[in-house]
Amino acid sequence: MRSLKLPDDLREELKRPLGELYRGDGLECIEAMAQKLRRATKVLAVGDITAYYLLEGGIEPDLIIVDHRTKRKPAPDHVRDGISQPSYRTLEVDNPPATLSNELIEMIRVALLGDERLKIVVNGEEDLATLPVILHAPLGSAVVYGQPGEGSVLVSVTIEKKDYIKELMDRMIAEE
């Protein structure tokens, strides 16, 4: 598989929440969605702030994907420290902005086949990682990511959601 580049015509569509938006800050959002998270097959977190608040709220995601940045700036030290969990094996991958590298997609796919808690640290940008996480997650999983300036989004993984994500990814520009 090749890397996928985000075309301009998909940017606006991807700014809309892919699931249920929980408005608020940090722990407020996590507490509001906690019951659904506890029932999920797997809990998967994309983003430093999201992962930090899930862990602070007592919920250990099965997979964490971070880039040590938030809103284009370095993540605060307390966030980096908070997501440095010894119970997670850490992997690193390069992924340029507005891109899904083949390596990132494959790392996510393989990670979601196993039961080991993993943290993937992206050198570049992790924003689009939500798409392959949803695509490859087991049905019944919960994918959580941040919606800048609004709160957190909880995506319940269903066949319909996977079909929608596949269609979005098929609309991206494949590059060698």
Image (cartoon, rainbow, N blue to C red):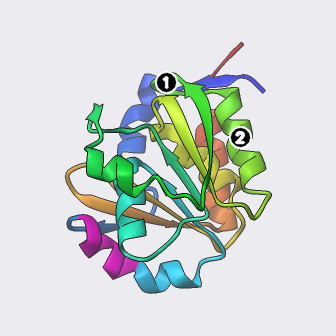
**Tag of residue 170:** none
Q: Residue at x 20, y 51 (%)?
A: 149
Corner quadrant of residue 88? bottom right
| Horizontal side, residue 43 vs residue 136: left or right | left
| Relative image position of residue 155 (x, y in whole percent) | 50, 64
Q: Report the mark closest to the observer, 1 or 2.
A: 2
Q: Are marks 1 and 2 in contact (CB under 8 Å)?
A: no
Up the image or down, 161 lies above or below 1; here it is: below
Residue lying furthest front? 86
Inspect the magenta stretch and tell me whether residue 27 lies in it.
Answer: yes
Question: Foreground residue, 98 or 83?
Answer: 83
Q: Quadrant of residue 170?
A: top right
- Residue 155 in magenta stretch: no
Disc 1 residue crowd, few under 14, some 14–19, many 20+, Cα 10 Å? few
The span from disc 1 to disc 2 (Cα, nearest Å) is: 23 Å
Helix, strand or loop status at disc 1: loop
Q: Is residue 60 above or below residue 65?
A: below
> In the rendering, at what x and y percent does residue 161 appear?
60, 60
Three-letter residue code for mark 1: Pro
* Residue beneath disc 1: 7
> What residue lies at 49% left-to-right and 82% top-to-bottom?
36
Compare residues 9 and 97 and report the one nearer the observer: 97
Counting residues from the start of the chain, the first of labels 1 and 2 encountered is 1
Amino acid at dot 2: Met
Label for residue 107?
2
